[in-house]
Image (spheres, rainbow, N blue to C red):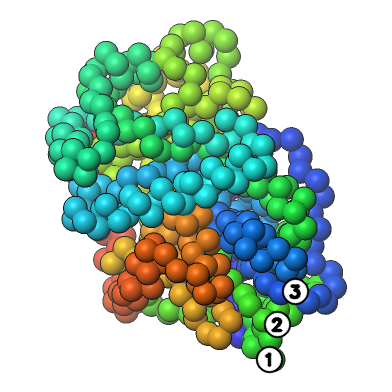
Amino acid sequence: MKVARLPKDPGPAAWNRLLPDADPATPLEENITADWLIIGAGFAGLAAAHRLSKQAPGDRIVVLDAVRVGDGPAGRNSGFMIDLPHDLTSADYAGALESDKAQTQDNRLGIAHAREMAQEYGLSDEAFSVSGKINGAATAKGHAHNVSFAKHLTALGEPHEMLDVAQMRDITGSDYYQSGLFTPGCAMIQPAMFMRGIASGLRSNHVSIHEMSPVTSLERQTDWVATTPKGRVIAPRVILAVNGHLNSFGYLPRRLMHVFTYASMTRALSEQERSSLGGHAAWGLTPADPMGTTVRRISGIGGDRIIIRNRFTFDPSMEVSDKRINDVARDHDRAFAARFPNLSDVGMDFRWGGRLCVSRNNVQVISELDEGLYSACCQNGLGTAKGTLAGGLAVDLAMGRSSDSLSRALAADLPSRLPPAPLSSIGANFFLKWQERQAGGEL
Protein backbone atom coordinates (compact mmCIF):
# COMPACT_ATOMS: atom_id res chain seq x y z
CA MET A 1 0.00 0.00 0.00
CA LYS A 2 1.23 3.47 -0.78
CA VAL A 3 1.24 5.73 2.27
CA ALA A 4 -1.25 8.51 1.56
CA ARG A 5 0.31 11.30 3.65
CA LEU A 6 3.57 12.02 5.42
CA PRO A 7 3.80 13.96 8.68
CA LYS A 8 3.80 17.76 8.54
CA ASP A 9 4.25 19.43 11.91
CA PRO A 10 3.61 23.19 12.19
CA GLY A 11 6.17 25.42 13.83
CA PRO A 12 9.41 24.48 15.59
CA ALA A 13 9.55 21.69 18.18
CA ALA A 14 10.55 24.09 20.97
CA TRP A 15 11.60 21.47 23.52
CA ASN A 16 14.14 20.12 21.06
CA ARG A 17 15.45 23.61 20.27
CA LEU A 18 16.39 24.07 23.93
CA LEU A 19 18.80 21.14 23.78
CA PRO A 20 22.31 20.90 22.32
CA ASP A 21 22.38 19.78 18.70
CA ALA A 22 21.87 16.06 18.30
CA ASP A 23 24.31 13.85 16.46
CA PRO A 24 23.70 13.81 12.69
CA ALA A 25 20.75 11.71 11.58
CA THR A 26 21.35 8.31 10.01
CA PRO A 27 18.65 7.88 7.35
CA LEU A 28 18.06 4.44 5.91
CA GLU A 29 20.08 4.29 2.70
CA GLU A 30 20.18 0.56 1.95
CA ASN A 31 18.01 -2.53 1.79
CA ILE A 32 18.06 -4.45 5.08
CA THR A 33 16.28 -7.27 6.86
CA ALA A 34 15.10 -7.32 10.45
CA ASP A 35 13.19 -9.51 12.86
CA TRP A 36 11.06 -6.54 13.91
CA LEU A 37 10.26 -3.25 12.23
CA ILE A 38 8.73 -0.39 14.21
CA ILE A 39 7.37 2.55 12.23
CA GLY A 40 7.38 5.68 14.36
CA ALA A 41 9.92 6.81 16.99
CA GLY A 42 7.51 8.53 19.37
CA PHE A 43 6.37 7.33 22.77
CA ALA A 44 4.70 4.19 21.40
CA GLY A 45 7.51 3.29 19.01
CA LEU A 46 10.38 3.68 21.46
CA ALA A 47 8.43 1.90 24.21
CA ALA A 48 7.86 -0.99 21.80
CA ALA A 49 11.55 -1.08 20.91
CA HIS A 50 12.49 -1.12 24.60
CA ARG A 51 10.04 -3.92 25.40
CA LEU A 52 11.37 -5.94 22.47
CA SER A 53 14.98 -5.41 23.55
CA LYS A 54 14.02 -7.13 26.82
CA GLN A 55 11.65 -9.82 25.57
CA ALA A 56 13.43 -10.74 22.34
CA PRO A 57 17.14 -10.32 23.06
CA GLY A 58 19.24 -11.08 20.02
CA ASP A 59 16.49 -10.16 17.54
CA ARG A 60 17.31 -7.39 15.08
CA ILE A 61 15.04 -4.42 15.81
CA VAL A 62 14.76 -1.52 13.37
CA VAL A 63 12.89 1.75 13.99
CA LEU A 64 12.03 4.19 11.21
CA ASP A 65 10.82 7.77 11.67
CA ALA A 66 9.99 10.48 9.15
CA VAL A 67 11.68 13.24 11.20
CA ARG A 68 14.28 13.63 13.97
CA VAL A 69 13.55 12.08 17.35
CA GLY A 70 11.89 14.79 19.45
CA ASP A 71 10.77 16.87 16.46
CA GLY A 72 7.46 15.10 15.85
CA PRO A 73 4.34 15.06 18.05
CA ALA A 74 6.24 13.34 20.88
CA GLY A 75 8.33 16.49 21.27
CA ARG A 76 5.41 18.90 20.92
CA ASN A 77 3.25 18.14 23.96
CA SER A 78 3.26 20.01 27.28
CA GLY A 79 5.16 17.29 29.12
CA PHE A 80 2.44 15.83 31.38
CA MET A 81 2.31 12.03 31.85
CA ILE A 82 -1.08 11.96 33.55
CA ASP A 83 -2.04 8.94 35.61
CA LEU A 84 -5.64 9.83 36.50
CA PRO A 85 -8.73 9.95 34.25
CA HIS A 86 -8.33 12.78 31.74
CA ASP A 87 -11.28 12.69 29.35
CA LEU A 88 -11.05 15.87 27.26
CA THR A 89 -14.77 15.69 26.42
CA SER A 90 -15.82 15.69 30.08
CA ALA A 91 -16.59 18.80 32.13
CA ASP A 92 -14.11 17.78 34.85
CA TYR A 93 -12.13 14.88 33.24
CA ALA A 94 -14.11 12.20 35.13
CA GLY A 95 -16.11 9.31 33.71
CA ALA A 96 -17.76 6.18 35.05
CA LEU A 97 -16.14 4.89 38.23
CA GLU A 98 -15.11 1.40 37.09
CA SER A 99 -13.82 2.53 33.70
CA ASP A 100 -11.83 5.32 35.38
CA LYS A 101 -10.23 2.80 37.73
CA ALA A 102 -9.16 0.73 34.72
CA GLN A 103 -7.93 3.81 32.88
CA THR A 104 -5.87 4.87 35.89
CA GLN A 105 -4.35 1.42 36.16
CA ASP A 106 -3.43 1.47 32.47
CA ASN A 107 -2.01 5.00 32.59
CA ARG A 108 0.17 4.01 35.53
CA LEU A 109 1.48 1.01 33.63
CA GLY A 110 2.56 3.40 30.89
CA ILE A 111 4.21 5.73 33.41
CA ALA A 112 5.92 2.78 35.12
CA HIS A 113 7.36 1.71 31.76
CA ALA A 114 8.59 5.27 31.17
CA ARG A 115 10.17 5.34 34.64
CA GLU A 116 11.87 2.00 33.94
CA MET A 117 13.40 3.38 30.75
CA ALA A 118 14.43 6.65 32.42
CA GLN A 119 16.19 4.78 35.22
CA GLU A 120 17.82 2.23 32.93
CA TYR A 121 19.26 4.92 30.65
CA GLY A 122 20.23 7.33 33.41
CA LEU A 123 17.90 10.21 32.51
CA SER A 124 17.86 13.28 34.75
CA ASP A 125 14.96 14.54 36.85
CA GLU A 126 14.52 17.30 34.28
CA ALA A 127 13.84 14.66 31.64
CA PHE A 128 11.48 12.59 33.83
CA SER A 129 10.18 13.10 37.35
CA VAL A 130 7.00 11.99 39.12
CA SER A 131 6.25 15.32 40.79
CA GLY A 132 2.48 15.70 40.40
CA LYS A 133 0.39 18.40 38.80
CA ILE A 134 -2.30 20.94 39.64
CA ASN A 135 -5.76 21.48 38.17
CA GLY A 136 -5.96 25.27 38.31
CA ALA A 137 -9.35 26.99 38.65
CA ALA A 138 -9.61 30.65 37.60
CA THR A 139 -13.40 30.99 37.97
CA ALA A 140 -16.19 29.87 40.26
CA LYS A 141 -17.26 27.44 37.56
CA GLY A 142 -13.74 26.05 37.35
CA HIS A 143 -13.62 25.68 41.12
CA ALA A 144 -16.90 23.75 40.98
CA HIS A 145 -15.30 21.42 38.40
CA ASN A 146 -12.38 20.86 40.79
CA VAL A 147 -14.72 20.15 43.71
CA SER A 148 -16.63 17.67 41.56
CA PHE A 149 -13.42 15.97 40.41
CA ALA A 150 -12.13 15.84 43.99
CA LYS A 151 -15.28 13.96 45.05
CA HIS A 152 -14.72 11.56 42.16
CA LEU A 153 -11.11 11.02 43.26
CA THR A 154 -12.30 10.30 46.79
CA ALA A 155 -14.63 7.64 45.39
CA LEU A 156 -11.69 6.21 43.45
CA GLY A 157 -9.57 6.19 46.61
CA GLU A 158 -7.02 8.54 45.04
CA PRO A 159 -4.98 11.05 47.10
CA HIS A 160 -5.46 14.75 46.34
CA GLU A 161 -5.18 18.15 47.99
CA MET A 162 -7.26 21.28 47.47
CA LEU A 163 -5.20 24.47 47.27
CA ASP A 164 -6.53 27.92 48.15
CA VAL A 165 -5.78 31.31 46.57
CA ALA A 166 -2.70 31.94 48.73
CA GLN A 167 -1.23 28.50 47.99
CA MET A 168 -1.81 28.94 44.26
CA ARG A 169 -0.12 32.35 44.38
CA ASP A 170 2.82 30.87 46.29
CA ILE A 171 3.31 28.17 43.65
CA THR A 172 2.60 30.09 40.44
CA GLY A 173 3.41 33.69 41.36
CA SER A 174 0.05 34.60 39.82
CA ASP A 175 -3.12 36.07 41.36
CA TYR A 176 -5.21 34.58 38.54
CA TYR A 177 -6.30 31.34 40.23
CA GLN A 178 -9.08 30.93 42.81
CA SER A 179 -8.12 27.39 43.75
CA GLY A 180 -6.21 24.33 42.70
CA LEU A 181 -6.46 20.56 42.96
CA PHE A 182 -3.08 18.85 43.39
CA THR A 183 -2.61 15.17 42.56
CA PRO A 184 0.77 13.50 43.11
CA GLY A 185 0.98 10.77 40.47
CA CYS A 186 1.62 12.76 37.30
CA ALA A 187 5.11 12.52 35.79
CA MET A 188 6.52 15.74 34.35
CA ILE A 189 8.95 15.40 31.46
CA GLN A 190 11.03 17.50 29.13
CA PRO A 191 9.62 15.68 26.11
CA ALA A 192 12.52 16.04 23.68
CA MET A 193 15.12 15.34 26.37
CA PHE A 194 13.19 12.23 27.38
CA MET A 195 12.77 10.97 23.82
CA ARG A 196 16.36 11.62 22.82
CA GLY A 197 17.62 9.97 26.00
CA ILE A 198 15.54 6.85 25.37
CA ALA A 199 16.64 6.71 21.73
CA SER A 200 20.29 6.98 22.78
CA GLY A 201 19.84 4.20 25.30
CA LEU A 202 18.16 1.95 22.75
CA ARG A 203 20.97 2.48 20.27
CA SER A 204 23.41 1.37 22.95
CA ASN A 205 21.32 -1.82 23.19
CA HIS A 206 21.76 -2.48 19.45
CA VAL A 207 18.41 -1.12 18.30
CA SER A 208 18.81 0.55 14.90
CA ILE A 209 16.96 3.90 14.68
CA HIS A 210 16.83 5.59 11.28
CA GLU A 211 15.57 9.17 11.39
CA MET A 212 14.54 11.22 8.33
CA SER A 213 13.31 7.98 6.79
CA PRO A 214 9.59 8.26 6.07
CA VAL A 215 7.86 5.06 5.02
CA THR A 216 6.30 5.74 1.62
CA SER A 217 4.83 2.28 1.08
CA LEU A 218 4.17 -0.86 3.08
CA GLU A 219 3.24 -4.14 1.45
CA ARG A 220 3.06 -7.77 2.41
CA GLN A 221 5.01 -10.20 0.27
CA THR A 222 6.40 -13.26 2.02
CA ASP A 223 7.29 -10.78 4.76
CA TRP A 224 6.42 -7.12 5.13
CA VAL A 225 8.36 -4.68 2.97
CA ALA A 226 8.59 -1.04 4.04
CA THR A 227 10.01 1.35 1.47
CA THR A 228 11.66 4.68 2.28
CA PRO A 229 13.06 7.27 -0.18
CA LYS A 230 16.52 5.60 -0.18
CA GLY A 231 16.04 2.10 1.17
CA ARG A 232 13.71 -0.59 2.42
CA VAL A 233 13.28 -2.93 5.36
CA ILE A 234 12.02 -6.50 5.09
CA ALA A 235 10.63 -7.93 8.32
CA PRO A 236 8.09 -10.62 9.29
CA ARG A 237 6.59 -8.45 12.05
CA VAL A 238 5.79 -4.75 11.96
CA ILE A 239 4.45 -2.45 14.66
CA LEU A 240 2.72 0.71 13.44
CA ALA A 241 3.32 3.33 16.11
CA VAL A 242 2.08 6.25 14.03
CA ASN A 243 -0.99 7.38 16.01
CA GLY A 244 -3.39 9.19 13.63
CA HIS A 245 -1.27 8.37 10.60
CA LEU A 246 -2.76 4.90 10.85
CA ASN A 247 -5.27 6.35 8.38
CA SER A 248 -2.43 7.21 6.02
CA PHE A 249 -1.52 3.52 5.89
CA GLY A 250 -5.10 2.71 4.83
CA TYR A 251 -6.52 1.50 8.14
CA LEU A 252 -9.72 2.60 9.92
CA PRO A 253 -10.84 5.27 7.48
CA ARG A 254 -13.44 7.70 8.89
CA ARG A 255 -12.91 6.40 12.41
CA LEU A 256 -10.06 8.57 13.72
CA MET A 257 -10.36 12.26 14.60
CA HIS A 258 -7.30 14.35 13.79
CA VAL A 259 -7.02 17.25 16.21
CA PHE A 260 -4.34 19.91 16.63
CA THR A 261 -3.55 21.73 19.82
CA TYR A 262 -1.17 24.70 20.10
CA ALA A 263 1.48 26.07 22.42
CA SER A 264 3.82 29.03 22.89
CA MET A 265 7.01 29.18 24.96
CA THR A 266 8.50 32.38 26.33
CA ARG A 267 12.07 33.47 26.05
CA ALA A 268 14.20 32.76 29.11
CA LEU A 269 13.27 34.99 32.03
CA SER A 270 15.89 37.35 33.41
CA GLU A 271 16.93 37.29 37.07
CA GLN A 272 14.87 40.43 37.67
CA GLU A 273 11.81 38.88 35.99
CA ARG A 274 12.16 35.71 38.04
CA SER A 275 12.33 37.79 41.20
CA SER A 276 9.30 39.86 40.16
CA LEU A 277 7.27 36.74 39.40
CA GLY A 278 8.16 34.74 42.49
CA GLY A 279 6.56 31.33 42.81
CA HIS A 280 8.19 27.95 42.41
CA ALA A 281 10.88 27.41 39.78
CA ALA A 282 9.04 24.49 38.16
CA TRP A 283 5.39 23.43 38.15
CA GLY A 284 2.69 22.13 35.84
CA LEU A 285 -0.96 23.20 35.72
CA THR A 286 -3.80 21.79 33.68
CA PRO A 287 -7.06 23.76 33.53
CA ALA A 288 -10.04 22.80 35.68
CA ASP A 289 -12.06 22.93 32.44
CA PRO A 290 -10.47 20.63 29.81
CA MET A 291 -10.86 23.35 27.16
CA GLY A 292 -8.97 25.90 29.24
CA THR A 293 -5.30 26.90 29.28
CA THR A 294 -2.50 24.60 30.37
CA VAL A 295 0.48 26.41 31.91
CA ARG A 296 3.90 25.08 32.75
CA ARG A 297 6.99 26.72 34.20
CA ILE A 298 10.34 25.05 33.58
CA SER A 299 13.84 25.67 34.88
CA GLY A 300 16.85 23.88 33.47
CA ILE A 301 18.60 23.59 30.13
CA GLY A 302 17.39 26.54 28.08
CA GLY A 303 16.63 28.73 31.11
CA ASP A 304 13.55 29.64 33.14
CA ARG A 305 10.55 29.73 30.78
CA ILE A 306 6.75 29.56 30.76
CA ILE A 307 4.68 27.49 28.33
CA ILE A 308 1.08 28.35 27.44
CA ARG A 309 -1.09 25.76 25.69
CA ASN A 310 -4.69 26.19 24.56
CA ARG A 311 -7.05 25.87 21.61
CA PHE A 312 -8.06 22.73 19.72
CA THR A 313 -8.98 22.41 16.05
CA PHE A 314 -10.26 19.44 14.04
CA ASP A 315 -8.20 19.05 10.85
CA PRO A 316 -8.82 15.86 8.82
CA SER A 317 -6.03 16.87 6.40
CA MET A 318 -3.57 16.52 9.30
CA GLU A 319 -2.07 19.86 8.32
CA VAL A 320 -2.52 23.43 9.54
CA SER A 321 -1.30 26.69 8.05
CA ASP A 322 1.10 29.29 9.40
CA LYS A 323 -1.89 31.64 9.53
CA ARG A 324 -3.58 29.31 12.01
CA ILE A 325 -0.50 29.42 14.24
CA ASN A 326 -0.52 33.23 14.07
CA ASP A 327 -4.24 33.41 14.86
CA VAL A 328 -3.90 31.11 17.86
CA ALA A 329 -0.88 33.09 19.05
CA ARG A 330 -3.16 35.99 19.95
CA ASP A 331 -5.11 33.73 22.30
CA HIS A 332 -1.86 32.55 23.89
CA ASP A 333 -0.69 36.11 24.41
CA ARG A 334 -4.01 37.07 26.02
CA ALA A 335 -3.88 34.06 28.33
CA PHE A 336 -0.28 34.81 29.30
CA ALA A 337 -0.98 38.52 29.94
CA ALA A 338 -4.00 37.70 32.12
CA ARG A 339 -2.00 35.33 34.30
CA PHE A 340 1.31 37.19 34.41
CA PRO A 341 0.68 40.95 34.06
CA ASN A 342 4.02 41.68 35.75
CA LEU A 343 5.80 39.98 32.81
CA SER A 344 4.41 42.29 30.14
CA ASP A 345 7.82 42.67 28.46
CA VAL A 346 8.34 38.92 28.09
CA GLY A 347 7.81 37.71 24.53
CA MET A 348 7.44 34.27 23.03
CA ASP A 349 10.46 32.53 21.53
CA PHE A 350 8.56 29.60 20.00
CA ARG A 351 5.03 28.84 18.77
CA TRP A 352 3.95 25.48 17.44
CA GLY A 353 1.17 22.98 16.89
CA GLY A 354 0.96 19.31 17.76
CA ARG A 355 -1.23 16.52 16.38
CA LEU A 356 -3.57 14.43 18.51
CA CYS A 357 -5.57 11.38 17.49
CA VAL A 358 -8.92 10.94 19.20
CA SER A 359 -11.76 8.46 18.81
CA ARG A 360 -15.36 9.43 19.49
CA ASN A 361 -15.76 6.57 21.97
CA ASN A 362 -12.35 7.19 23.62
CA VAL A 363 -10.77 3.85 22.67
CA GLN A 364 -7.25 3.06 21.48
CA VAL A 365 -6.30 0.88 18.53
CA ILE A 366 -4.09 -1.85 19.95
CA SER A 367 -4.62 -4.86 17.72
CA GLU A 368 -3.30 -7.13 15.00
CA LEU A 369 -4.38 -5.42 11.78
CA ASP A 370 -3.09 -8.12 9.46
CA GLU A 371 -0.85 -11.15 9.78
CA GLY A 372 2.30 -9.90 11.48
CA LEU A 373 1.14 -6.24 11.45
CA TYR A 374 0.30 -4.66 14.81
CA SER A 375 -1.10 -1.28 15.78
CA ALA A 376 -0.19 0.88 18.80
CA CYS A 377 -2.25 3.93 17.83
CA CYS A 378 -4.97 6.45 18.79
CA GLN A 379 -3.86 7.81 22.15
CA ASN A 380 -6.88 10.10 22.76
CA GLY A 381 -4.88 13.16 23.79
CA LEU A 382 -2.67 11.36 26.33
CA GLY A 383 0.12 10.26 24.03
CA THR A 384 2.82 10.39 26.68
CA ALA A 385 1.28 7.78 29.00
CA LYS A 386 -1.12 5.98 26.66
CA GLY A 387 1.41 5.88 23.83
CA THR A 388 4.02 4.31 26.09
CA LEU A 389 1.42 1.79 27.25
CA ALA A 390 0.33 1.03 23.68
CA GLY A 391 3.86 0.32 22.46
CA GLY A 392 4.46 -2.20 25.19
CA LEU A 393 1.07 -3.87 24.74
CA ALA A 394 1.56 -4.21 20.97
CA VAL A 395 4.76 -6.14 21.65
CA ASP A 396 3.01 -8.33 24.23
CA LEU A 397 0.30 -9.07 21.69
CA ALA A 398 2.82 -9.95 18.99
CA MET A 399 4.70 -12.27 21.37
CA GLY A 400 1.62 -14.01 22.75
CA ARG A 401 1.86 -12.56 26.25
CA SER A 402 -1.27 -11.74 28.23
CA SER A 403 -2.29 -9.20 30.86
CA ASP A 404 -5.43 -7.54 32.17
CA SER A 405 -4.44 -4.35 30.37
CA LEU A 406 -3.98 -6.11 27.04
CA SER A 407 -7.27 -7.97 27.50
CA ARG A 408 -9.05 -4.63 28.02
CA ALA A 409 -7.44 -3.21 24.90
CA LEU A 410 -8.40 -6.20 22.76
CA ALA A 411 -11.96 -6.22 24.11
CA ALA A 412 -12.51 -2.54 23.23
CA ASP A 413 -14.85 -1.63 20.41
CA LEU A 414 -13.52 -0.18 17.19
CA PRO A 415 -13.36 3.63 17.16
CA SER A 416 -16.84 4.92 16.35
CA ARG A 417 -17.44 5.88 12.74
CA LEU A 418 -17.39 9.61 11.97
CA PRO A 419 -20.14 11.44 10.08
CA PRO A 420 -19.33 12.05 6.41
CA ALA A 421 -17.28 15.09 5.39
CA PRO A 422 -17.86 18.00 5.57
CA LEU A 423 -20.37 17.38 8.37
CA SER A 424 -17.69 15.86 10.61
CA SER A 425 -15.41 18.90 10.25
CA ILE A 426 -18.20 21.42 10.70
CA GLY A 427 -19.68 19.60 13.66
CA ALA A 428 -16.37 18.91 15.43
CA ASN A 429 -15.02 22.45 15.06
CA PHE A 430 -18.35 23.95 16.14
CA PHE A 431 -18.34 21.72 19.22
CA LEU A 432 -14.73 22.63 20.08
CA LYS A 433 -15.41 26.36 19.74
CA TRP A 434 -18.56 26.05 21.82
CA GLN A 435 -16.63 24.21 24.55
CA GLU A 436 -13.91 26.87 24.50
CA ARG A 437 -16.51 29.61 24.92
CA GLN A 438 -18.04 27.68 27.81
CA ALA A 439 -14.60 27.54 29.44
CA GLY A 440 -14.71 31.33 29.87
CA GLY A 441 -11.93 32.58 32.17
CA GLU A 442 -10.36 29.13 32.29
CA LEU A 443 -9.19 29.82 28.73
Q: Is residue 172 above or below residue 414?
A: above
Between 194 and 11, the one lying in front of the other is 194
Q: Residue at x 15, y 38 (%)?
A: 151
Element at label 2: strand
* Residue at the spot 26% in from the left edge and 31% down from the top edge: 160
Q: Residue at x 46, y 51 (%)?
A: 110
Amino acid type of the residue that numbered disc 1 sits on in the rendered structure: Gln
According to the picture, the residue beneath numbered tag 1 turns out to be 221
* Residue 397 coordinates in the image, percent (x, y): 50, 72
Task: Identify the secondary structure beneath mark 1.
Answer: loop
Residues tagged 2 and 1 counted as in contact (Cβ below 8 A): yes
Label 3 with label 2: CB-CB less than 8 Å? no
Q: Secondary structure at mark 3?
A: loop
Position of 399 with respect to 333 (left or right) is right
* Image location of residue 4, percent across then percent down: 57, 77
Nearest to the observer: residue 421 or residue 86: 86
The first of marks 3 and 2 along the sequence is 3
The Cα atoms of the two marked residues, 2 and 1, are separated by 7 Å
Distance from the alpha carbon under mark 3 to that under mark 1: 15 Å
Q: Which circle marks residue 225 in the picture? A: 2
> Could you give the CA–CA distance between mark 3 and mark 2, rounded to whole angstroms?
10 Å
Q: Residue 197 appears at what percent x and percent y?
A: 67, 43
- Dot label at residue 34: 3
Q: Amino acid at mark 2?
A: Val
> Mark 3 or 1, which is nearer the eye?
3
